[in-house]
Image (cartoon, helix red, strand yellow):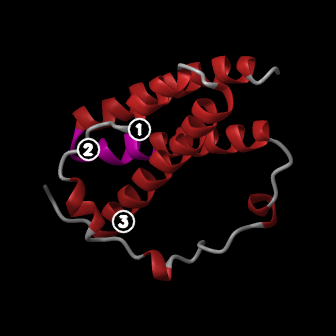
Amino acid sequence: MTTNPPLFRTIDANINRYKEGIRVVEDILRYEFDSPLAKELKKLRHINIPDYEKYVDYRDSINDILKPSTKSEQQRSSIKEIVIANLKRSQESARVLEESFKLFDIITSEKFKTARYSLYNLEKEILKLLGT
């Protein structure tokens, strides 16, 4: 594996976003709706990432220039808004990971591509569950 600190920092941040976004929706489906869709999300959250610890070494969350929240990130008016925001967060992160891993690990890239499409399909089912 080549060393590319900015790329590895991008990968680390997006792994966190991907998993955090899924976890928020997973817990809402689990505790608010007792939905078996939570199990599908859990499987996606547990995607295997080879050499994960190497990416953590490049983490610099203290100096992240976009750490402060925007106004829209500070407000949610419903469970549905929380779910949509977090699904989008995970889908976008999966895309960044898919593209980043293309540079040196096509197998992991394809895992995130598959995960992204699974999230798109689950989003449709979850929004039906929420009554939209």
- Above/below status of 89 relative to 54: above
Name the mark nearer the viewer: 3 or 2: 2
Distance of label 1 from label 3 (alpha carbons): 19 Å
Is residue 53 inside the magenta stretch?
A: no
Badge 3 is on which residue? 9
Quarter of the image for residue 120 reads top right
Name the mark nearer the viewer: 1 or 3: 1
Q: Earlier in the sequence, mark 3 or mark 2?
A: 3
Q: Judge by depth and name the residue closer to the eye, 103 or 11.
A: 11
Q: Which residues are magenta?
A: 96-105
Badge 2 is on which residue? 49
Q: Position of residue 124 (x, y in %)?
A: 66, 19
- In the displayed orientation, state which residue is furthest to the left: 1
Q: Judge by depth and name the residue closer to the eye, 17 or 29.
A: 29
The quadrant the N terminus occupies is bottom left
Q: Secondary structure at mark 3?
A: helix
Question: Which amino acid type corresponds to the residue marked 3 in the rendered image?
Answer: Arg
